[in-house]
Amino acid sequence: MFFDEEFETLPREAIQALQLKRLQAMVSRVYHCVPFYRDSLDKAGVAPDSFRSLADLQRLPFTYKQDMRDSYPYRMFAVPMEEIVRIHASSGTTGKPTVVGYTKKDIDNWAALMARSFVAAGVHKGDIIHNAYGYGLFTGGLGAHYGAERLGASVIPMSGGNTQKQIMIMQDFGSTVLTCTPSYSLFMAEAAKEEGIDFKQLKLRVGIFGAEPWSEAMRNDIESKLNLSAVDIYGLSEIMGPGVAIECAAAKKGLHIWEDHFIPEIINPETGAVLPEGEKGELVITTITKEGIPLIRYRTRDITSLTYEPCVCGRTHARIARMSGRSDDMLIIRGVNVFPSQIESILMGVEGVEPHYVLIVDRKDMLDTLEVQVEVGEEIFSDEIKHLQALSFQIEKKIKEMLGVTCKVRLVEPKSITRSEGKAKRVIDNRPKA
Amino acid sequence: MHVEQISVFIENKSGRLAEVTRILGEAGINIRTLSLADTSDFGILRLIVNDAEQAKGVLKERGFTVSKNEVVAVEIPDRPGGLAELLQVLDGESINVEYMYAFVERSGENAVMIFRFEETERAITTLTGKGFAILPGERLY
């Protein structure tokens, strides 16, 4: 099933031809409309009309989140404000947020790409979409909402929070599709269980989860606890919002990135060099259809890899692997690179361990320390100390074997790790800032 | 022949033990005896109460991880060497004691010890064979 079969199944040569044409037009437009790009292209010595092939993209300088902050709020916009019909902003954890503006056509494209994404995930007209992504400056809520309407499905604009009510509505309204962060889906499952509500009695069939990295093991856990088919969706407000890429229900192996609108590259985050297909590195995206705020080689900070292998679903667009973390989430512990998602995978591989964990990083006597807090639920509890100690030891040993870092596992009481209704906080870094 | 025991996971931080006993007290549950096994991070509180099922329920409701399992209560002559005799019998049969603790009240002239064995049934058969009295749970609750 496709939403836009012609474009979703374009042969590779046709995708590339379209990308080149759109890239040339975009670069020449931003050169003339955005002083930031004129400066950066001039500095790099690239003439905007000198593009002959897609490989020329590599001659262009990167754009960083900091560039957007420096242009706060509107200086990166490539159209006059009269053309902007919507403004979103990213959840800036430090300082000013990054601001993005959409023209009417941008909103239109976004809705269409999100509708494509819904269909790829196995959603169709007639579904009731329970949208628990936050509505507001965050792009999640409205992005999914417009896509659902474009598809012609019924959308319930729940937004985040008020879990009891979410569960009641899902039950009473007969929601068939759930959209939220993966950690919030598990939070809801837990809350439902406490109220004696069985997710297996609900009509949910598909879950579309994103906005934070999650593991394959967590997918299995969500699928069994919520009794639905869970797919990963990717997006970021700077590029558009949700619907930049999505897993197809047919393969659930990598996320199709809509290449008629975005050009993905994988680079070595330290050197900036473009990496060959299949290698892991930072995802860089160039938008080629956006009008409001086009971005050239935007550094997403997300770590993944790219494949052009044909997919069983019939879509010809490249796939990015599930995000294994963010280059700025990456913890360096005694020189070893550690992503929280790697630890999550290990924990989920231990029988009975729940996906509620926190990593506490500290420094003692000049040495980094890593503590992994794991909740003790009934499944792993024992009246004998030795069994619990063996469990801690088993996890410590696995982490050492697989990641090469020594850690200490601390068993904590259930619910002592804060539950999140949005993005889960997985890391507390108490090391003094350099 | 078995005694019901509940075990509670508690983090090693102030107030947790008080919290458990307060919850049980408010629910009108009487603690008959208890023991606390602790490590540097956490402890396992083992309790024998007058109503194990209800105790488990109220603690779970308050977010504690609780399990219920069976232990054995044995009468031991209350004189020097009483416990040593019993342990010798177990040792002779290579029966492992996982842990043990004392019951607060006496049973007539005898002291009462609570045992968690690796092989409960074999331990009971061996001890009764050697003349030790095993107390049923109802005598303790």
Image (cartoon, rainbow, N blue to C red):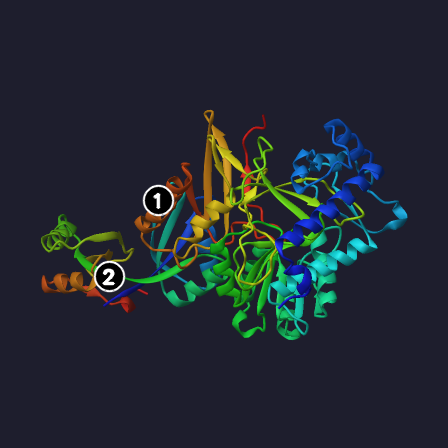
Q: Is mark 1 on a helix, strand or loop?
A: helix
Q: Which residue bears the numbered disc 2?
A: B72
Q: What element carries label 2?
A: strand
- Tags 2 and 1 in contact by the CB under 8 Å rule? no
**Quick one: A8 or A151, which is closer to the camera?**
A8
Whole-percent x, y for residue A299 in the image? 65, 39
Identify which amino acid the numbered label 2 is placed on.
Val
Look at 41% across and 53% down and name the residue there. Answer: A349
Residue A263 higher or lower than A1, as above or below: above
- Residue under mark 1: which chain is it in? A
Quote the CA–CA distance across marks 2 and 1: 30 Å
Whole-percent x, y for residue A155 in the image? 71, 67
- Residue under mark 2: which chain is it in? B
**Quick one: A24 or A264, which is closer to the camera?**
A24
Identify which amino acid the numbered label 1 is placed on.
Phe
Q: In this view, does B26 lie to the left or right of A62?
A: left
Which quadrant would the C terminus of chain A be assigned to in this image?
top right
Q: Quadrant of residue A168?
A: bottom right
Look at 28% across and 58% down and name the residue there. Answer: B105
Which quadrant would the N terminus of chain A be assigned to in this image?
bottom right
**Quick one: A290 or B116, which is closer to the camera?**
A290
Whole-percent x, y for residue A283 in the image? 61, 43
**Quick one: A279 or B137, which is closer to the camera?**
A279
- Whether labels 2 and 1 belong to a single chain: the reply is no
Q: Is residue A132 visible?
A: no
Circle number at residue A393: 1
